[in-house]
Amino acid sequence: MVIHNGGCHCGRVRFEVEAPATIAAHICNCSICSLTAYVHLIVPKSRFRLLAGEADLETYTFNTGVARHHFCRVCGVKSFYVPRSNPDGFSVNVRCLQPDTIESVTIDRFDGREWEAHAHELEHLSRDESRPAGSRSQRTRRDHEPPVAVEPATWGGIKARFQ
């Protein structure tokens, strides 16, 4: 595990998150994630620390109200939030992390349009279980689901592989 630093565009909201250097992330096709191109790194609350900007955060909720979408009131960037799938944790936007501590990012699809049928696939990500450093979370992937892209890509200086 390493400490990744991140935040919003204007720099008022700053945080750190403890996660592997090789990040296993998710993209979601629900209405809000699709519109914002959010790339999820879900972690237990104990591995997330807000360092600055609490007074600059606004919160947006919709539908069930369980998800708490926090965004900077100055620049509008949502760099983290409390997800409906994991209300006991945080989802950090990988796009908002500084790249210096990231070795690579693997991005899996999550079917948020059919949230009720697939929410269980993410439950384990916010559990604060002891895992050896560098171990990856167990992920569930449906065999019929096509990859997002097959070739490696460079994304913001980070080697990313879409699955």
Image: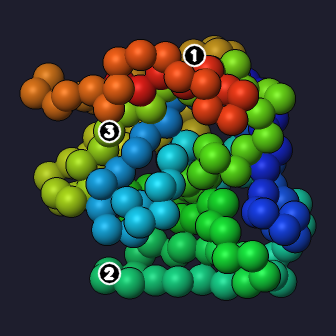
C-alpha gap between disc 1 and disc 2: 33 Å
Front residue of 90/72: it is 72
Q: Is residue 51 left or right of residue 156?
A: right
Give the quadrant of the C terminus. Answer: top left
Three-letter amino acid code at the position of disc 3: Arg
Front residue of 44/145: it is 145
Q: Which mark is residue 135?
A: 1
**In the rendered image, the vertical position of residue 4 relative to residue 56, given as above or below:** above
Q: Which mark is residue 64?
A: 2
Front residue of 16/125: it is 16
Give the image quarter of residue 124: top left
C-alpha gap between disc 3 and disc 2: 23 Å
**Mark 3 or mark 2, whichever is nearer to me:** 3
User: Which residue has dot 3 on it?
Assistant: 109
Q: Which mark is residue 121?
A: none
Question: SS class of the residue under badge 1?
Answer: loop
- Residue drawn at (70%, 51%) of the image: 96
Of callouts 3 and 1, which one flags the residue occurring earlier in the amino acid sequence? 3
Of callouts 1 and 2, which one flags the residue occurring earlier in the amino acid sequence? 2
Q: Is residue 62 left or right of residue 100?
A: left
**Mark 3 or mark 1, whichever is nearer to me:** 3
Q: Position of residue 145 (x, y in %)?
A: 17, 31
- Residue drawn at (84%, 60%) of the image: 14
